[in-house]
Amino acid sequence: MEILYGRPDDCAGRAPEERAVYDLLDRLGVEYGRIDHEAVMTMEACEEIERVLDVAVCKNLFLCNRQKTEYYLLLMPGDKSFHAKELSAQTGCARLSFAKADAMESCLHIKPGAVSVLGLMNDSENRVRLIIDRAIVNSDFIGCHPCVNTSSLKLRTVDLLERILPAVHHDYAVVDLPAE
């Protein structure tokens, strides 16, 4: 694996979701590093990706309330564990749990294993509320997938918060999740 900058020279054979991410980033003038790799499904599988990109890849969790009427995307450091009770206390959203894959695909047009903050560009109805752990907000860079799990990006966090999220019409809330 080697880090490359900007979109691939040839996007033939790339998923439409991935090409749409590159189109968005290019339209906004956001610089990014990129690596291609085998499909990854776990945070442990991201260790080599993190080393090459020199950034921690975010853990992205797609959650819902008990009634499955409200959806949340939680960005947190990969080395933290998810505790629903702690998150519920900070957000005022009781009974949070993992949402079903079909809800994620419906809201973000992303398949399990490829969930990414960049999928919010597909949430034109603003059905998903973004929640970000303060450790991510305070970091210089963020690592995420371009809506597929065979490539990873390194973005400046300020670009995510101040350029990308406003462009896709999403706000965010900050939480302080405890370290293990």
Image (cartoon, rainbow, N blue to C red):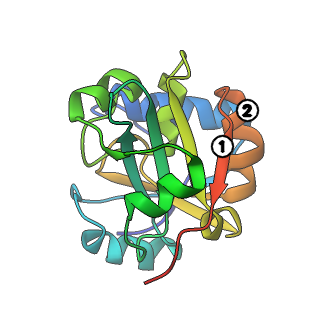
Marker count (numbered): 2
Image coordinates of residue 94 in percent, x first then y, are: 44, 44
16 w.r.t. 57: above or below: above
Q: Relative to the observer, which residue lies in front, 130 or 87?
A: 87
Image coordinates of residue 166 in percent, x first then y, are: 73, 32
Estimate how packed mark 2 is, as few (under 14), some (14 to 19) or many (20 or more) residues with alpha carbons within 10 Å.
Answer: few
Q: Amino acid at mark 1?
A: Tyr
State which quarter of the image contains the C terminus: bottom left
Q: Which residue is pictured at 62% across the width and 37% down the height?
A: 25
- The residue identified by callout 2 is 166
Q: Which residue is pictured at 30% across the width and 49% down the height?
A: 149
Residue 58 appears in the rendering: no
- The residue identified by callout 1 is 172
Q: Relative to the observer, which residue lies in front, 104 or 2?
A: 104
Image coordinates of residue 130 in percent, x first then y, are: 56, 42
Q: Earlier in the sequence, mark 2 or mark 1?
A: 2
Direction from residue 137 to residue 36 in the image, left or right: left
Q: Relative to the observer, which residue lies in front, 85 or 97?
A: 85
Q: Nearer the viewer, mark 2 or mark 1?
A: 1
Report which quarter residue 33 is drawn in: bottom right
Q: Amino acid at mark 2?
A: Pro
State which quarter of the image contains the N terminus: bottom left
Residue 46 appears in the rendering: yes
Q: Label 1's element?
A: strand
Q: Which residue is pictured at 54% across the width and 17% down the height?
A: 124
Estimate how packed mark 1 is, as few (under 14), some (14 to 19) or many (20 or more) residues with alpha carbons within 10 Å.
Answer: few
Q: Which residue is pictured at 33% across the width and 28% down the height?
A: 68
